[in-house]
Image: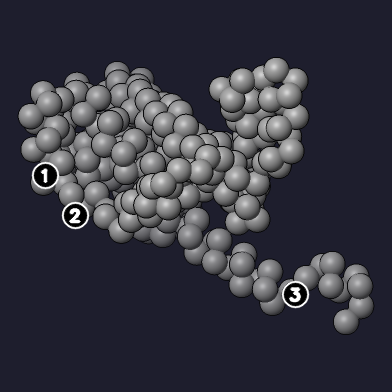
Amino acid sequence: MSAISRRRGNPVAYLISFALVGFCFLPALYIILGGFRTNSQIIQKPSGLPDPWVASNYIDVLAGSLFWREAANSLICAFGTTLGVVVLGLMASYAIARYNFKSKQAMYAFFSAGLMFPITVAITPLYIMIRDLGLVNSLAGVILPQIAFALPMTIIILTPVLKAIPKELEEAALVDGASRLGFFARMAVPLAMPGVITVGVLAFVGSWNGYLLPLFILSNEALYTLPLGVQSFASQYSVDTARVLAFVALSMIPALIFFSVLERRIVGGLTGAVKG
C-alpha cells in the first residue's frame, strides 16, 4: 500500500462511517424538514420533501411565548448544571490526580461506581430527598441531581488530564512563589481546558436533553423545560403534526449547534484523557 493510500485511509471504512452518520442524522433531518410541510403534505406523502416549503409552523412557534419560556428554563438548568459540574469536578479531580492520601483510590472507585447507577434506578429515593429538601417544583431541584449524576463521568475524564501535567512544572511554579491554589487556578485549569470543555459540553447537552428528572420534579407548567414542553405541546396539538415537528426541531437545534461547534474540542479532551 502506498503512502498516499495510507494517508487517505480505507474507502470502505469511510463509506461505512458516512452511512452510519447518515442513518443517525436521518430522524433529525426528517423532523426539521417536517416542520416546513403542511399536515396535508405529511398525510399524503409522509416521507416526502416539502412541496411547497412552508415557514408558518416555525414562525408560529417562535412568535409564541411558550417556546421561549421553556427554552429559558432549559438554559438555566443547563448552565447551572454545567457550572456546578465543571467547578466541583475540577476540584475533586485535581485532589485525586495530584495529591497522595490514604483514601485516594477508594474515592476514585466511589466516583467510578456512580456510573453503574443510572438515574432511572434512583428516581424514587431521589424524589423523596428532593421533596424533603423543599425543592420540588423548582429548577434547583433539577440542577442539583443533574450535577451529582454528571460528576462520575466528569471525574473519570478530568483525573488523567490533570495527572498528565508534569510535576516539574508544579515544582517550578512553587519555587517561583505560587501557592498550590495559585498553580491550580493559573496553570492547571488552563492546561486542562480541552478536558474541561469536553465535560462542560457533555453536561450541557445531557441537561438540555434531560427528561425523566424534570418529569418527576416539575409539575408547574411555568417551570417546564423543553423536553417536558415538547410532550405537553404534542399532547395539546396532537392533530397538528407539522407544528409539533417544528417545535421539536427548534428544541433540539441549540444542543446540536452547541455540540457541533465544540466537536473538535470534545475529541481533543477525550484523547487527552485516554493518553493521561
User: Could you say which disc has been placed on residue 102 in the image?
Assistant: none
Secondary structure of residue under mark 3: loop
Q: Amino acid at mark 3?
A: Asn
Discs 2, 3 touching: Cβ within 8 Å: no
Question: Which image quarter holds the N terminus?
Answer: bottom right
Q: Earlier in the sequence, mark 1 or mark 3?
A: 3
Residue 78 pos. (x, y %): 38, 30
- Give the mark count: 3
Name the element at disc 2: helix
Q: Depth check: 5 or 168 in front? A: 168
Q: CA distance from mark 2 to mark 3?
A: 42 Å
Check disc 3 and report the residue beneath it.
10
Label 1 SS: helix
Query: N-terminal of the two: label 2 or label 3?
Result: 3
Q: At 38% from the left edge and 47% from the top edge, which residue is drawn?
A: 103
* Extreme-bottom residue of the structure: 1
Residue 47, percent from left and from top: 41, 59
Q: Residue at x 22, y 45 (%)?
A: 212
Query: CA separation, marks 1 and 2?
Result: 9 Å
Which quadrant of the view contains residue 242?
top left
Q: Amino acid type of disc 2?
A: Val
Answer above or below: position of 236 versus 5: above
Q: CA distance from mark 1 to mark 3?
A: 50 Å
* Residue 271, x across and y down, in percent: 64, 53
Residue linked to disc 2: 121
- Camera-near label (2 vs 3) is 2
Q: Is residue 23 above or below residue 111?
A: below
Q: Nearer the viewer, residue 206 or 16?
A: 206
Residue kind at label 1, given as amino acid type = Pro
Q: Residue at x 60, y 56 (%)?
A: 274
Q: Which residue is mark 1?
A: 125
Image depth: mark 1 or mark 3 in front: 1
